[in-house]
């Protein structure tokens, strides 16, 4: 599910999923916040493709907070900032509160995300379409699901397209992956 405050943030979120790297991916995997107060050489080596994209978009600091309840991982809240520096105690508290509210909203299911007309329903459809495309590529190429997702990501990146667009084209059979292209 991707919900963003503006088109630039949305593109940066989508890019993390396409590349399979970035603070969102790290926070989700480790189940811990990722607090990068400055996009320095450490960040550049940690996310060699994603970090330069952040800098090009004018981002100088990024903070990712996992959305989870016990063992259930629901997603990640990312906060981008145009200037370097750590979050103040007040801003950190606000980010953690917002993450808690997001978890409550996701678990409740009665409140809808306000970022789009479809809210959570649209996000669920997005996930289903991506999983369907992943399965289709798996069958087309005779590879594992993990490899199929890697192929979808690589194609999206190489063609400078959103992963959601590529998945929609695969599901609609406008795009197929051929074994001869391996």
Image: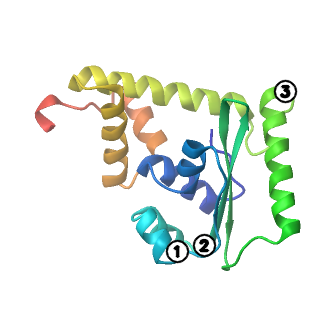
Where residue 86 appears, as percent x and y from the top left, is 72, 73
SS at badge 2: loop
Q: Which residue lies furthest to the top in this view?
A: 139
Q: Earlier in the sequence, mark 3 or mark 2?
A: 2
Q: Is residue 12 above or below residue 99?
A: below
Q: Residue at x 60, y 49 (%)?
A: 27
Left or right: residue 61 compared with residue 180: right
Tell me where residue 160 sits by quadrant: bottom left
Q: Residue at x 56, y 32 (%)?
A: 126
Give the labeled residue for mark 3.
108
Q: Residues within 10 Å of mark 3 (few under 14, many from 20)?
A: few
**Do labels 1 and 2 touch, CB within 8 Å?**
yes
Give the labeled residue for mark 2.
59
Left or right: residue 15 compared with residue 6: left
Give the labeled residue for mark 1.
55
Position of the C terminus, as image quadrant, is: top left
Q: Which residue is drawn at 31% across and 27% down?
A: 137
Q: Residues within 10 Å of mark 2 (few under 14, many from 20)?
A: many
Q: Distance between the residues labelled 3 and 2?
A: 33 Å
Position of the N terminus, as image quadrant, is: top right
Left or right: residue 13 compared with residue 49: right
SS at badge 1: helix
The answer to whether residue 46 shows anywhere in this view is yes
**Do labels 1 and 3 touch, CB within 8 Å?**
no
């Amino acid at each position: 599910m991707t919900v963003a405050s503006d088109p630039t943030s949305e593109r940066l979120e989508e890019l993390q999923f396409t590349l399979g790297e970035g603070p969102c991916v790290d926070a989700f995997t480790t189940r811990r916040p990722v607090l990068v107060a400055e996009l320095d050489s450490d960040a550049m080596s940690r996310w060699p493709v994603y970090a330069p994209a952040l800098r090009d978009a004018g981002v100088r600091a990024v903070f990712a907070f996992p959305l989870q309840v016990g063992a259930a991982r629901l997603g990640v809240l990312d906060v981008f900032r145009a200037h370097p520096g750590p979050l103040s105690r007040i801003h950190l508290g606000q980010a953690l509160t917002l993450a808690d509210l997001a978890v409550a909203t996701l678990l409740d299911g009665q409140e809808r995300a306000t970022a789009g007309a479809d809210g959570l329903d649209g996000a669920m459809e997005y996930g289903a379409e991506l999983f369907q495309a992943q399965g289709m590529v798996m069958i087309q190429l005779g590879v594992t699901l993990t490899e199929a997702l890697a192929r979808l990501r690589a194609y999206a990146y190489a063609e400078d397209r959103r992963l959601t667009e590529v998945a929609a084209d695969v599901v609609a059979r406008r795009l197929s992956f051929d074994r001869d292209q391996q």
